[in-house]
Image: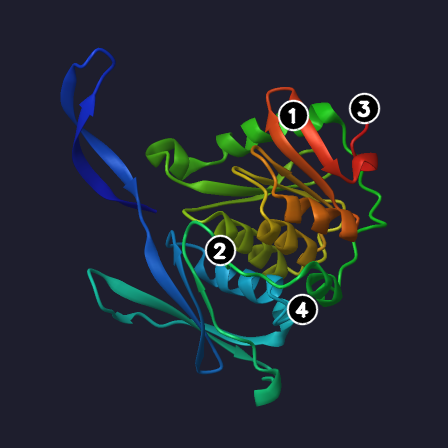
Amino acid sequence: MTGGRRRVLRVEQGGASRWVVDDLTAEEPLEIQLDGASLSVTMRTPGDDFDLAVGFLITEGIVRSAGEIATLRMCPRAGAGSGPLNIVQVSLRHPPGAAAAPRSFFMTSSCGICGKASIDQVRTRTVYPVGADPLVVSPALLASLPSRLRDAQRQFSRTGGLHAAGLFDRDGNAVCVREDVGRHNAFDKVIGWAATAGRLPLTSHLIVASGRASFELTQKALMAGIPLLAAVSAPSDLAVDLAEEAGMTLVGFLRGEGMNVYAGHRRVHP
């Protein structure tokens, strides 16, 4: 979804300028309510909102499968500011008691959740250990994925303002690609789609991030049982630590024919 068209002054190399019309990416707030209580507010690109909500619940360990969710309902209302505040209302089949109720979250489109739980907490929450996953891929296959991801980014080609997450099988076939202004949202949309389709855990699959590999994206991949995360930019040190602890493969700087394998080296083999 694009956010509309704007007339802009384009300055060319050498100083020449002209007026052009530019497509802009849409960015709107989404509130996730769980059993009547506000759980999360995120700035996202509208579209695939139910997948985003389901993926968020999965990757935060609030539910283990989409089967634990009784209903999902979109509830638009007039919000403060310039536009509508969209709300996804989620009801669980077996709501947690007050003592076990999840905490609230606020996310921007850029950074996801700051101040995340420790690696030990993440490790104890995931129900899909990936250390024994038999996936092995070649460097050539990995090198081909960024271009395949870019080819599937329909909105990026128009606006240039979106991150993407691409889920691929062991042969490099694109299974699901989602775009969003927030890279963490793009991951949640992919994982929510997989959960709703009953495909978790994502054994012997790999996920490609169009930007950097943060701790949060590594956690999300782990919570979905994905054994390999590849990113076109750099990972953080905490992302590498988590991947090593979990037995995941983490690849960064996946550009052209080169890449850095930061963890799980045994899965990358000619």
Q: Earlier in the sequence, mark 4 or mark 3?
A: 4
Secondary structure beneath disc 3?
Answer: loop
Using the image, determine if residue 34 lies above or below residue 158.
Answer: below
> What residue type is disc 4 on?
Arg
Task: Tell which of 116 and 57 is nearer to you.
Answer: 116
Q: Earlier in the sequence, mark 4 or mark 1?
A: 4
Color style of the picture:
rainbow
Q: Earlier in the sequence, mark 1 or mark 3?
A: 1
- Label 3 – label 2 distance at C-alpha: 35 Å
- Label 4 – label 1 distance at C-alpha: 32 Å
Secondary structure beneath disc 1?
Answer: helix
**Dots 3, 2 in contact, CB < 8 A:** no
> What residue type is disc 2 on?
Gly
Is residue 152 in sight in this rendering? yes
**Dots 2, 4 in contact, CB < 8 A:** no
Secondary structure beneath disc 2?
Answer: loop
Task: Tell which of 44 and 70 is nearer to you.
Answer: 44
- Label 1 – label 3 distance at C-alpha: 12 Å
Q: Position of residue 225 (x, y in %)?
A: 72, 54
> What residue type is disc 3 on?
Pro
- Label 2 – label 1 distance at C-alpha: 27 Å
Using the image, determine if residue 161 lies above or below residue 57.
Answer: above
From the viewer's perspective, is the residue at label 2 or at label 1 nearer?
2
Q: Position of residue 182 (x, y in %)?
A: 44, 49
Disc ID at residue 143: 1
From the viewer's perspective, is the residue at label 3 or at label 2 nearer?
2
From the viewer's perspective, is the residue at label 2 or at label 4 nearer?
2
